Image (cartoon, grey):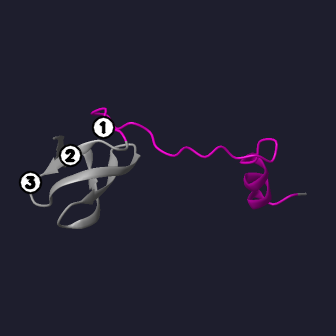
Amino acid sequence: MQSARGKRKEAGIIDGRAKVVESLPSADGIERGVRVFHQKFGYGKVKSVDGNKLEIDFEKAGTKKVMDSFVERA
């Protein structure tokens, strides 16, 4: 009899292949490469999107992770 842990491990595998998603658009439609403005960090360019979480390379503040509701398109 297999343990519950073994069953979970097998259930997550489909044909032995995994699909990697580079970025999904945020709720506001902000995508990778879009220039945005943040009240504290200033202007930056979106590096990646994970739901409503953005990784942004800000011009003066460096790379930060912020929620899409805290930025606006520039």
Instruction: Determine which residue is flagged by label 2.
Output: 36
Crowd rating for badge 1 (residues with CA inside 10 Å; few <14, some 14–19, many 20+):
many
Residue at 20% from the left image edge and 46% from the top image edge? 36
| Amino acid type of the residue that numbered disc 1 sits on in the rendered structure | Ile
Disc 1 to disc 2, C-alpha distance: 9 Å
Circles 1 and 2: CB distance less than 8 Å?
yes
Q: Secondary structure at mark 3?
A: loop
Along the horizontal axis of the image, is 67 left or right of 39? Answer: right
Tell me which secondary structure the magenta stretch mostly adopts.
loop
| Amino acid type of the residue that numbered disc 3 sits on in the rendered structure | Gln
Residue at 39% from the left image edge and 43% from the top image edge? 51
Instruction: Determine which residue is flagged by label 3.
Output: 39
| Amino acid type of the residue that numbered disc 2 sits on in the rendered structure | Val
**Total marks drawn?**
3
Mark nearer the N terminus (3 vs 1): 1
Instruction: Determine which residue is flagged by label 1.
Output: 30
Task: Tell me which segment is drawn in magenta.
Answer: 2-31
Q: Position of residue 43 (x, y in %)?
A: 16, 53
Magenta residue check for 11: yes
- Nearest-to-viewer mark from 3 and 2: 2
Foreground residue among 10 and 67: 67
